[in-house]
Amino acid sequence: VSELAKAIDQKVDNATHQLADGAGEKNHNGSLIARAFQVISTVQVALIALETEVGIPDTLKKKVGEAKVKSNEFLNKLEESKDQVDAAKAIDIIKGDGSKGGNELKALNQLVSELLKAAEDAVEAAIKKLTFLLKADLAIFS
């Protein structure tokens, strides 16, 4: 979504095939908001699936649940204000004031980062455990 925010008030320059200043044209932002909505909706579907997955540690499930709540809050904010001039406030967590969903998106980004770190830690712990068990088995047969 942060990448989408870079295109706020921009248009595609046909000559350079690059983003260019929209020269005050604010009509380019509606599709950005729609795309951000779709990205987070897709993330939310994955979070719901993860939340019901068997075998995931409770610490991860808690983070998944928190991220699901924040994704829902962000989607609700986008539904409340679909105005194209609010795009920066909705999806730009750096330049926007956050009042139209940006704060919720920032919190969601933080939770997803924490979730990824927790998942990485769980994978590393599982690898260490498997490595230990493998070494123990090899020692028995030596």
Image (cartoon, rainbow, N blue to C red):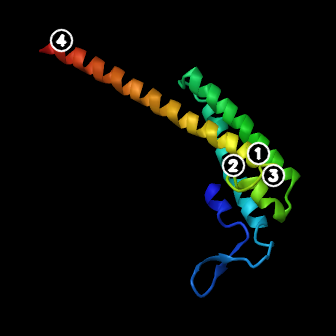
Residue 136 can be seen in this image: yes
- Of labels 1 and 4, the one closer to you: 1
Check whether the beta carbons of the residues at disc 3 and disc 1 lie within 8 A of each other: yes
Mark 3–mark 1 Cα distance, whole angstroms, equals: 6 Å
User: Percent x, y for residue 81?
Assistant: 86, 55
Q: Give the x, y percent position of residue 45.
A: 67, 43
Residue occupied by mark 1:
74
In the shown orientation, is residue 77 left or right of residue 40? Answer: right
* Mark closer to the chain start, 2 or 4: 2
Q: Secondary structure at mark 3?
A: helix
* Disc 1 secondary structure class: helix
Label 3, label 4: how many angstroms apart (C-alpha)? 60 Å
Q: Are marks 2 and 3 in contact (CB under 8 Å)?
A: yes
> Which amino acid type is shown beneath numbered disc 1?
Phe
**76 vs 89, nearest the viewer:** 89
Look at the numbered discs 1 and 2 and tell me whether their residues touch, using CB distance below 8 Å: yes
Q: Quadrant of residue 9?
A: bottom right
Name the image quarter holding the N terminus.
bottom right
Where 42 sits versus 50, above or below?
below
Residue beneath label 3, please? 78
Residue sticking out furthest to the bottom: 15
- Mark 1 in CB contact with mark 4 (< 8 angstroms): no
Which element carries disc 2, helix, strand or loop? helix
Q: Is residue 121 left or right of residue 105?
A: left
Q: Residues within 10 Å of mark 1 (few under 14, many from 20)?
A: many
Q: Secondary structure at mark 4?
A: helix
Using the image as rendered, state which of residue 20 and residue 134 is in the foreground: 20
Location of mark 2 (residue) = 40
